[in-house]
Amino acid sequence: MSKLIYFTRVALNNTAKNIFVSLVSIGTLSLSLLILSAFILLYTNVQNIIKSSTQDLSISVYLDDNISQADLTKLKKSLSELPQTAGINHISKSQALADLKSRFGAHGALLDGLDENPLPASLELKLKPEYRSQNLVRALIKRLENFDGVIDMGYAWEWADKLSGLLNFIKLCGLVIGGLLFLATIFIVSNTIKLTVYSRREEIYTMRLIGSTEGFIKAPFFIEGLLQGLAGGLLALIALFLIFNLLVSQIKFPLGLTVINLTFLSPTAALTLVGSGIFLGLLGSFVSLRRFMGE
Amino acid sequence: MIQLYHLTKVYNGRKVALNDVSFKVDEGEFVFIAGPSGAGKTTLIKLIMCEERASQGQILVDRLNLQRIKPNKIPYLRRKIGVIFQDFKLIPTRTVFQNVALRLEVQGAKRSFINKKVRVILKNVGLEGLGEALPPQLSGGEQQRVVIARAMIGDPLILLADEPTGNLDIDLSRNILNLLLDINKGGTTVLMATHNQEILQETNKRVIRLDQGRLVA
Ligand SMILES: Nc1ncnc2c1ncn2[C@@H]1O[C@H](COP(=O)(O)OP(=O)(O)OP(=O)(O)O)[C@@H](O)[C@H]1O
Ligand SMILES: [Mg+2]
């Protein structure tokens, strides 16, 4: 314990002596972690949106205002006979308007001015989970289009489809940029440590001559790297949190999309972020000591 | 305590600093290593503390064969050997107290133990009240005594003194010689390298003479 305090004191001393370089090192570390975690945050949120929109396995079958009772009954019957169907819910024109109003929230009163209800009635077709696959849904939609009295089809997966493409793109960018930043960070941290090693090289040599083990000499440098990593990780986390909250409060969602819930990093992910900082710092020290202090 | 057999040290494959040197130093002995500049005195001390490796021959310190010692055992060998370096090797940014304490710190000694020991030893070498000074603020003789204090602390088995009276006047040199003789009386084996003839005449201790890397009778 007293050894740990001793090593930490030496590490802090070293940091203080090279304060400018140490700050640059911490800054780079936190900047690259910030960029990387921003990608992760974006990725998880897009993923969440896709998940929540595909959880509701339903297709809206919009009906012609003038559909005959006979056609409606026939349509309902054929839909319920489909193997994919888990249930059918009839949503009348007035029900549709009420739903829309509630989604508009505070702006709902705007709709009161309408002379006539412009929304179509619909049949909400709940699908069995095993028919979740997008290809099967597309095939089903092709078939439904030919029914009498059906004017349009809607399903939440339409744009989930597009987001999936985006998701892969975010992942790729995150991996490439993240990888490069990690390398750059290790390089910069290891150079900062190198500077300390260099400025203390005579002292280190003397310590060896008076009986110091390599571990005793190296421990403060590892702690220096660890502390820089910890500081960088925490800074990145705080910056990400502030930027996230700023964006969430600034973004105006288009009407009807306010249901999307943006979430910050989970506690585990936040800890991983700080942990990555520590890991990078230690790795930087390791690389530096391997290269500049081999005996 | 120290045994050398046909010890040869060649620097950079060209410069022969020690040439076929053999002798023994018994436990508790006080031995002078005498010889002119460039004779190989410092080289000999570096070999005994494992700062340099011998090119040929064998060297045993406290029954440890230094030609075969594992690198991770060297620190423990050096803890048994106090060295008064010719070039001091004091850390200029650390206080006198911290410089002396460092030798115990690297051995993982307790803070309270270190503080007590350092205070006593600084008093022994006559540096009371200078603990908080930085080495560059001290005179040559004072710095020399800091180095002696650091070499003595931790009660080493062996004390290697490389020109401990280097540039000091004769009174101060005698003073330091007496300090080393006292340490030797406490049981520590002392090897003192010097080219100072006056100092050699002060005692009747054994003298090993070197010239151009060779032992001379
Ligand atoms: N690291 C080195 N590389 C090459 N040559 C060296 C090295 N160290 C010492 N020498 C040479 O070896 C010879 C012996 O040097 P050494 O330092 O042992 O002498 P010394 O007896 O201690 O001299 P002095 O009384 O001046 O301190 C000298 O000629 C010196 O130039
Ligand atoms: Mg010398």
Image (cartoon, rainbow, N blue to C red):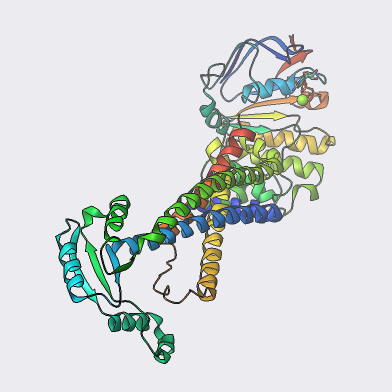
Look at the image and tell me whether residue A13 can be seen: no
Residue A206 x, y percent position in the rendering: 66, 37
Residue A17 x, y percent position in the rendering: 69, 53
Q: Is residue A219 above or below residue A150?
A: above
Residue A198 x, y percent position in the rendering: 70, 40
Residue A106 x, y percent position in the rendering: 42, 87
Q: Is residue B92 above or below residue A91?
A: above
Label count reads 0
Residue at x 81% of width, y 46% of height: B139
Q: Is residue A251 left or right of residue A269?
A: right
Q: Is residue B133 above or below residue A105?
A: above
Q: Is residue A213 above or below residue A39?
A: above
Q: Quadrant of ligand 1?
A: top right
Residue at x 77% of width, y 35% of height: B174
Foreground residue among A69 and B115: A69
Hey, which quadrant is residue A54 in on the image? bottom left
Foreground residue among A209 and B64: A209
